[in-house]
Amino acid sequence: MSATANFSTSNMGLLEVLKAAQDADASDIHLIANHVPMVRVNTVVQPLAGLGILTPENARRFLEQMANKEAMARFEQSKDSDFSYFAEGLARYRVNAHVQKGQLGFAMRVVKTKVPPLEKLSLPEVITRLTYLPRGLVLVTGETGSGKSTTLAAMIQAMNERYSKHIITLEDPVEYTFNSARSLIEQRELGSDMPTFASALKHALRQDPDIILVGEMRDLETTQLAITAAETGHLVLSTLHTCSAAQTVERIIDMYPAGQQNQIRSMLANTLQAVVSQTLFSRSDKPGMCPAVEVLLCTPAVRNLIRESRTFEIPNVIETNRAMGMQTLDRSIGELYFNGMISREDAIAAATMPDKLDRMLAA
């Protein structure tokens, strides 16, 4: 059966779709011409009931409503465009417009406008301690949709309320909108406010920042500048699409040519303060989501492992330093299962070492 079976075409409006998605408590909205609107609710993709099929004409109208002139030009040139959209009374959205099988499509991530307090995110207490760091590099990693942006926003807001500092965020696009409290916050968006992360980060270092949020360390130049900023006394927060602390360290080192890798190991060992790796689970005890979190804190032992290219030993160091607040992803997953929050099947499927976790859950 096709995705469009049993549905009639509809002259739906954009706000009608967004309101229905909000009512369904969707985290993501998927719109493709000649298909019914789909949404993701607690990790499950499902049709948005009662709206019919999105016509190509309506899809084009949606694009023209949401995309500004620059975003429209990027779409016409490359058939792909990333931008943000704000719907009055509803939410902000991170939007990707694209073409598939000759038809216009959208992937829209709902961006919560209110930054949640750190204590409401069910994260380990050690994450709050990281917001007291004066300098260095803190990385929050995980797959797309794992809650990285929310964690970082909550950390920035905690520092905004506590310190009188200058905070600069470089984002693609701007998600949470901050109001300067005790700190002065500037938010720059890729495309409209800056051409690249690397360019903006280079200039940010001349803008008297104390804290810099880099939306993603996606290339070598951005990574080099982020590490340099951390070396020169700034607190730098950023993300990578990696699933563990050890993998994160290796990913950064592998960005560099072989002849520079010893040097970057030394620089990273000196600047890295912590790696927080997240994954989100759909709760089995009630509606909603909960995070499993791996935490690596850069103790002298960890710094030596990075310098000596022994990152494969990082999981053992994490496991033996739980009293400091460190924890492996699998142990965090196990705690969620034993607390009745997630199913055994979901726990094992997301584990770093499924067989070992299976034995632990059976104990």
Image (spheres, rainbow, N blue to C red):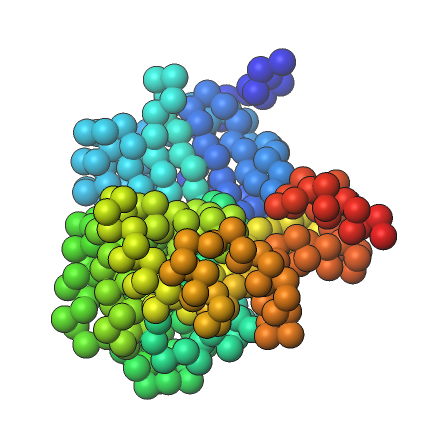
- The structure residue drawn at horizontal position 34% and vertical position 34%, both measured from the top left corner, is 97
**Position above or below: 167 against 50:** below
Q: Quadrant of the N terminus?
A: top right
Give the residue furthest to the right: 363
Residue 112 at least partly seen: no
Give coordinates of residue 304: x percent, y percent. 43, 65
- The structure residue drawn at horizontal position 66% and vertical position 53%, both measured from the top left corner, is 330
Give coordinates of residue 195: x percent, y percent. 17, 50
Residue 352 at least partly seen: yes
Give coordinates of residue 322: x percent, y percent. 64, 69
Total numbered labels placed on residues in the image: 0
- The structure residue drawn at horizontal position 51% and vertical position 77%, both measured from the top left corner, is 129
Locate residue 65 relative to residue 225 in the image: left or right: right
Of residue 147 and residue 82, the one placed in the foreground of this image is 147
Locate residue 361 relative to residue 245 in the image: left or right: right
Question: Which quarter of the picture shows residue 163?
Answer: bottom left
- The structure residue drawn at horizontal position 43% and vertical position 47%, both measured from the top left corner, is 241
Give coordinates of residue 109: x percent, y percent. 45, 46
Give the residue furthest to the top: 1
**Position above or below: 287 against 17:** below
Of residue 119 and residue 26, the one placed in the foreground of this image is 119
